[in-house]
Image (cartoon, rainbow, N blue to C red):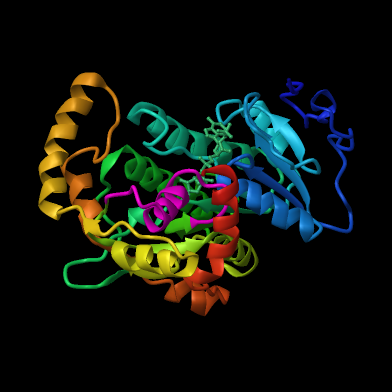
């Protein structure tokens, strides 16, 4: 079990790794990054990239987190509700990448609200109290939705949140905007924030047992009977990391950037996976009407049993059948952000899926 050191990094000695980290061990020739959510799907890949680029990386890890192979990360053991750990994590960091978050797949609505909203507030408090460079907050494209007849949602299409996840992320975004406004002289609450918010769409890549594994199974698995109607923006893991780093380097203070990928209907995405991998895609779309009908049932069941199912409620049922397409034009123009087609991300994702999920 890891040593719990609320005011400094865990050296990793009890987990069998070389003990290379100390509270003051920053590489003077490189920059220091503090990463929350470092043990997650996106955070792990971000840490790997930062280390490869010569950053000193501090990662927040819960005592129970799986830290994988990230031996060179300086681990700060604690959670988003331990202010002292957060303060020591971020103090002296050139960049704070706040990725920690939780969705309705893995927690109840109350926990989702608390982690995403209050957790972000706590990270900002820690930044205000310390000497930190820029904060990059990872929200979700889900807080944006195309209006009326527009096909693609942009950063300005702020949507009425649906469900606890979107609601908590939308509130967290406002906290971050306020923190960023402090440094623009727009606010007199005493901080000196510098922050950018990124909005990834659906991230596809190795290590994601949720969305990525489900989409791949629809393209490969003969036993999968059906796919959802509607569509989504699928963005490769490495493209999102490029976007996060570009937001750190080039983003405007207080700005928001959608980090999207190809906009595809589910059947098109599934067909392309099947073609690439020689699989046999799910052929039958689930009728939208059936999903809309199931929404209210799941809502009642969820209320009575306090358990989450899919679709979670009527509004979410409707979302599952819509085309949730996004424009990444702003990130392209201001950050130089580019995304690759789905096929560019399939080899790594398939290799992982076949090793870990089949
Ligand atoms: N994946 C996507 O398609 C997608 C799309 C848009 C936005 N995002 C956002 O991107 C971020 C990363 O997503 P992901 O897919 O990498 O999620 P993930 O794999 O579930 O990772 C979540 C991370 O947050 C940490 N965490 C959760 N609750 C915490 C707490 N109370 N204190 C400290 N750490 C806590 C987890 O720690 P443990 O390892 O201990 O669980 C884990 O490191 C999230 O904010 C998510 O909302 C993801």
Q: Nearer the viewer, residue 100 or 68?
A: 68
Q: In the image, 136: left or right of 157?
A: right
Quadrant of residue 296 within the rendered picture? top left
Residue 27, given in percent of the width and then of the height, sits at 87, 51
Q: Residue at x 43, y 64 (%)?
A: 273
Q: Which region of the structure is painted magenta?
A: 204-225
Quadrant of residue 126 within the rendered picture? top right
Q: Residue at x 42, y 32 (%)?
A: 106
Residue 196, given in percent of the width and then of the height, sits at 53, 58
Q: Is residue 61 magenta?
A: no
Residue 188, given in percent of the width and then of the height, sits at 50, 48
Q: Is residue 205 magenta?
A: yes
Q: Say whether residue 91 is visible.
A: no
Q: Residue at x 55, y 73 (%)?
A: 337
Rendered view: 81 above or below 126: above
Rendered view: 314 above or below 45: above
Q: Nearer the viewer, residue 63 or 158?
A: 63
| Quadrant containing the N terminus in the rendered view | top right
Q: Nearer the viewer, residue 32 or 19?
A: 19
Q: In the image, 292: left or right of 57?
A: left
């Amino acid at each position: 079990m890891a040593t719990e050191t609320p005011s400094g990094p865990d050296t990793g000695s009890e987990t069998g790794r070389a003990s290379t980290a100390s509270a003051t061990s920053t590489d003077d020739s490189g920059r220091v990054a503090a990463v929350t959510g470092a043990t997650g799907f996106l955070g792990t890949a971000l840490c790997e990239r930062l280390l490869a680029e010569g950053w000193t990386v501090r990662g927040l890890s819960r005592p129970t987190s799986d830290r994988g192979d990230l031996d060179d990360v300086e681990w700060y053991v604690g959670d988003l509700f331990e202010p002292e750990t957060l303060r020591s994590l971020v103090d002296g960091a050139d960049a704070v990448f706040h990725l920690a978050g939780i969705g309705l797949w893995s927690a109840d609505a109350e926990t989702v609200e608390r982690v995403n909203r209050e957790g972000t507030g706590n990270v900002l408090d820690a930044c205000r109290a310390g000497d930190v460079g820029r904060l990059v907050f990872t929200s979700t494209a889900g807080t944006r939705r195309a209006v009326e007849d527009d096909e693609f949602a942009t950063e300005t299409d702020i949507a009425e949140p649906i469900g606890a996840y979107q609601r908590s992320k939308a509130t967290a975004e406002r906290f971050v905007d306020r923190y960023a406004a402090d440094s623009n002289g727009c606010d007199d609450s005493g901080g000196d924030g510098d922050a950018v918010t990124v909005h990834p769409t659906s991230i596809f890549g190795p290590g994601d047992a949720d969305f990525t594994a489900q989409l791949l199974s629809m393209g490969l698995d003969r036993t999968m009977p059906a796919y959802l109607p509607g569509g989504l923006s699928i963005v490769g893991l490495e493209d999102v990391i490029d976007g996060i780093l570009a937001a750190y380097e080039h983003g405007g203070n207080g700005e928001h950037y959608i980090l999207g990928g190809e906009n595809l209907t589910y059947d098109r995405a599934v067909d392309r996976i099947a073609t690439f991998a020689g699989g046999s895609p799910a052929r039958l779309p689930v009728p939208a009407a059936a999903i809309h009908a199931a929404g209210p049932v799941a809502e009642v069941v969820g209320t009575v049993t306090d358990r989450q199912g899919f679709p979670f409620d009527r509004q979410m049922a409707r979302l599952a059948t819509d085309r949730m397409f996004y424009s990444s034009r702003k990130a392209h123009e201001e950050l130089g952000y580019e995304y690759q087609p789905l096929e560019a991300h399939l080899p790594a994702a398939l290799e992982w899926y076949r090793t870990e999920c089949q």
